[in-house]
Amino acid sequence: MTDRLAHFVSHRTSVGLALALSIAAHGMAPRASAQRVEIIGHRGAAALAPENTLVAFRRACDIGVDGIELDVHLTADNVLVVHHDYALHPDIARDRTGAWIPDTDRPLLRAMTASTLTQYDVGRLRPDSDYAKRHPGQVAADGERVPTFDAVISLFEQHCAAPTRLVVEIKTDPTQPRVSATPDQVADATVAQLRRRGMSARAQIISFDWRALRRVQAIAPEIPTSYLTFTGKDWDTIEAGKPGASAWMAGLDVDDHGGSVPQAIVAAGGRNWSPNAGNVTPELLAEAHRLGLRVFAWTVNAKTDMTQLIRLGVDGLTTDRPDLVRDLLAELGRTP
């Protein structure tokens, strides 16, 4: 199973440089804009509390985010659970004895029941791991378990005041179909759960797998979607200039739309775009806004990158440090 996390981290370090070079090359200044910049807590508040846990979601809502982002999967008994990877992560999960699970034996969530998952503790990071080095300020919460989506909704109802929303990422991979349920299955279950709990009006569904988003748009047009994208050296969900359509784009070929990701999203029926922050340029942002798309950049944790993107005019930032974004918006005289 390909782990793309390290690549994301290394790519994010160049966000500010990439933006600065693009602005300089095209003689463009960041767009002065008075629009409100939304704060989306990535996996809750992953730099502050164990990611994708109830304590992380509550921490994000205590800070005052506009949305809590989380990842959903279907278990073997078709229960929606909240976890990032398709399998338990060796830097996050400990078994009943307190031992970290080995990297060579990572059980897929799809192969486990929801009750089996409760045997694992995901409340602290493995010392000296890349995860721990990336989030040195994370406060451990021993005893936290992989929560069900239903449990997250219950906490959300109790502790996250409206209009805070659930930003739900459907985790399916068209290049590795066996690691999860199908996009239609996960989309259908997610929509059903949101409707059952009366949360459709406070939700947004996002995914790299555009098949899931088109399914949501077909069965639940009342729930907004946002199209996740990433373009890098080791992973590219768009594949501009290559023969045929990217597997991630639900049959759309970006080259049929002038190589423009915003135009492809509009063609797919989308109204929101969630690009990796390192892929945001003034030209692409301007084009997206001309087409009526809102743009939410991810995952932005450095203050310099936050400042650059806010001044450029993004509509929202997905971040492991929602506290830092909130403080920065106040410094810049923007209403957080």
Image: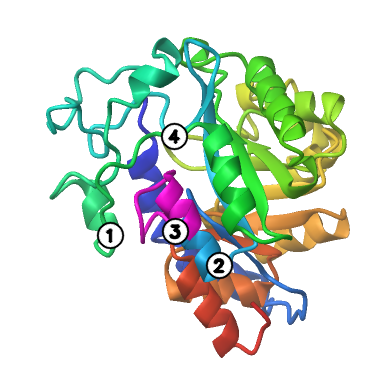
* Residue 214, image x, y percentages: 78, 27
Q: Is residue 199 above or below residue 175?
A: below
For the residues labelled 1 and 2, say whether their Cβ atoms are less than 8 Å apart: no
Nearer the observer: mark 4 or 3; the answer is 4
At 72% from the left and 60% from the top, the residue drawn is: 162
Query: What's drawn in magenta, residue-wise?
Result: 45-58
- Dot 3 or dot 2, earlier in sequence: 2
Question: From this viewpoint, is residue 279 visible?
Answer: yes
Tell me the chief SS of the magenta region.
loop
Q: CA distance from mark 1 to mark 2?
A: 32 Å
- Dot 1 or dot 2, earlier in sequence: 2
- Dot 4 or dot 3, earlier in sequence: 4
Asked if the stretch drawn in magenta spans residue 49, the answer is yes
For the residues labelled 4 and 1, say whether their Cβ atoms are less than 8 Å apart: no
Badge 3, how many Cα within 10 Å: few under 14, some, many 20+? Answer: many
Q: CA distance from mark 1 to mark 3?
A: 13 Å
Q: CA distance from mark 3 to mark 2?
A: 20 Å
Q: Amino acid at mark 1?
A: Val
Label 1: which residue? 139
Disc sitting over residue 19 in the figure: 2
The quadrant where residue 96 appears: top left
Badge 1, how many Cα within 10 Å: few under 14, some, many 20+? Answer: some
At 64% from the left and 90% from the top, the residue drawn is: 333
Label 4: which residue? 83
Q: Amino acid at mark 4?
A: His
- Dot 4 or dot 1, earlier in sequence: 4
Nearer the observer: mark 1 or 2; the answer is 1
- Image quadrant occupied by the N terminus: top left
Disc sitting over residue 320 in the figure: 3
